[in-house]
């Protein structure tokens, strides 16, 4: 029987590469499309080594519609998972046109090409950032979105709206938006993981680079928040668990199991963890001491957010399975692997 094929745009990136692995493990064919602006072939090679499958990869910028059209002409996928986007919050404030141009153009192109070619299923990588500073915790999918505090966050909201309106207008198109909380960790093989360029903006890559001696000291942004230990609280979701959520979302669409043509699911653990707790867990699990200090609050940070995941649990049959200990061990194993540390 011919296998279902899934186009993974941004498939050489952090979440995309882990998702490609889980799709292949679940029996899907995968085509990776990536412009390699913030990724490299090493991730694709990691996917190939883990799976033993010579995954096809096309170097293409999804913003270039005629080049992107050729991918649709060449491959017979019925489903797309769209990761290709810029994701640095601070950079989006400094260069909003880059973010609106890139994230919106590539998404409009993918949806319109799916419509043009009669392709049916799309998963969009959304973010918990759409909730902003929520009035009640944990957040459910019904929790109202707050006005975005960065152009990056705004592109996530706008793309959700584009998807909602497009599935309502174009027959046969189905969409699922997955709102990720904070993805961390690496594949247990340590062959793929997060590889930020330059100074990491996110907590866990900063921690692992500090442990590796690349950064001198981790700054903990604020210890005077109204939380039990004064640091911010987030819902840290293991990257492999997150990748599996995409597989079940695709399987739901391919199997005709969607309740509505546009659905939204929170993808998190359902547990809030503070920055101090995360740092202490990293130290304990990996048996090392981290050099850190308390620094002023970072502009734009929300105090606390974590997910109510009951909808994904019930409808997708998906649960976060890996523990924070396992995830933080995998993050360190990956950092050691890429730095050649024993
Ligand atoms: C941000 C984005 C989110 C995006 C995610 C992954 C917002 C508000 N958040 O999440 O949309 O999906 O990145 O790209 O748009 N911290 C430190 N020291 C550091 C770095 C971080 O203390 O060096 C703290 C932060 O203050 C925060 C927590 O660690 O409390 C997590 O930060 P980070 O990993 O950057 O993720 P978010 O800001 O939650």
Image (cartoon, rainbow, N blue to C red):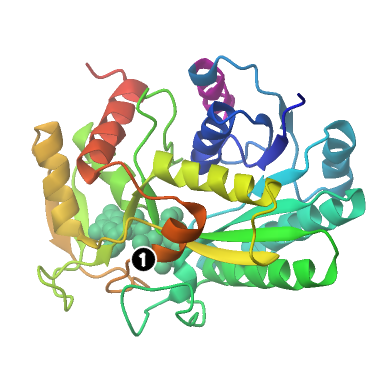
**Residue at the (41%, 43%) spot, across then down:** 241
Q: Where in the figure is residue 31, as x and y percent of width and height?
A: 70, 31
The relative height of residue 336 versus residue 61 in the rendered view (above or below) is above
Instruction: Name the side, left or right, on which 187 lies relative to 84.
Output: left
Instruction: Name the side, left or right, on which 25 lies relative to 167.
Output: left
Q: Where in the figure is residue 54, as x and y percent of width and height?
A: 65, 16
The relative height of residue 143 versus residue 159 in the rendered view (above or below) is below
Q: Quadrant of the N terminus?
A: top right
Mark 1 crowdedness (10 Å alpha carbons): few <14, some 14-19, many ≥20:
many
Instruction: Name the side, left or right, on which 159 lies relative to 287.
Output: right
The relative height of residue 255 versus residue 96 in the rendered view (above or below) is above
Q: Give the range drawn in magenta.
A: 40-49
Taking the view exactly as shown, the residue that stands out farthest to the bottom is 135
Instruction: Name the side, left or right, on which 247 lies relative to 290.
Output: right
Q: Nearer the viewer, residue 262 or 115?
A: 262
Question: Which residue is labeled 1 in the image?
Answer: 307
On the image, which quarter does residue 73 sit in? Answer: top right
Q: Quadrant of the C terminus?
A: top left
**Residue at the (73%, 32%) spot, across then down:** 59
Q: Where in the figure is residue 24, as x and y percent of width and height?
A: 58, 28
> Magenta stretch mostly in which secondary structure?
helix
């Amino acid at each position: 029987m011919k296998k279902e094929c899934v186009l993974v745009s941004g498939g050489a990136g952090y979440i995309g590469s882990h998702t490609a692995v889980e799709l292949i493990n679940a029996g899907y064919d995968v085509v990776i499309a990536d412009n390699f602006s913030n990724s490299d072939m090493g991730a694709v090679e990691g996917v190939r080594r883990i799976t033993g499958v010579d995954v096809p990869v096309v170097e293409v910028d999804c913003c270039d519609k005629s080049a992107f059209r050729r991918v649709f002409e060449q491959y017979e996928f019925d489903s797309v998972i769209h990761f290709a986007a810029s994701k640095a919050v601070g950079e989006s404030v400094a260069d909003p046109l880059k973010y609106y141009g890139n994230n919106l153009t590539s998404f409009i192109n993918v949806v319109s090409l799916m419509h043009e070619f009669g392709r049916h299923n799309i998963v969009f990588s959304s973010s918990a950032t759409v909730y902003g500073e929520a009035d009640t915790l944990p957040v459910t999918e019904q929790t109202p979105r707050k006005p975005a505090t960065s152009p990056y966050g705004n592109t996530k909201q706008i793309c959700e709206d584009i998807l909602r309106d497009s599935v309502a207008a174009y027959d046969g198109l189905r969409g699922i938006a997955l709102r990720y909380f904070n993805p961390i960790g690496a594949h247990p093989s340590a062959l793929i993981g997060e590889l930020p360029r330059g100074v990491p903006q996110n907590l866990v890559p900063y921690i692992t680079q500090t442990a590796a001696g690349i950064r001198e000291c981790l700054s903990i942004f604020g210890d005077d928040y109204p939380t039990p230990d004064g640091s911010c609280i987030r819902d840290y979701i293991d990257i492999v668990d997150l990748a599996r959520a995409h597989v079940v979302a695709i399987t739901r669409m391919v199997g005709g199991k969607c309740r509505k043509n546009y659905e939204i699911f929170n993808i998190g653990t359902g547990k809030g963890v503070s920055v101090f707790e995360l740092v202490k867990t990293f130290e304990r699990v990996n048996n090392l001491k981290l050099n850190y200090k308390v620094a002023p609050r970072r502009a734009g940070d929300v105090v606390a957010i974590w997910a109510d995941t009951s909808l994904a649990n019930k409808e997708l049959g998906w649960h976060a399975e890996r523990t924070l200990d396992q995830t933080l061990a995998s993050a360190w194993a990956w950092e050691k692997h890429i730095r050649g540390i024993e």
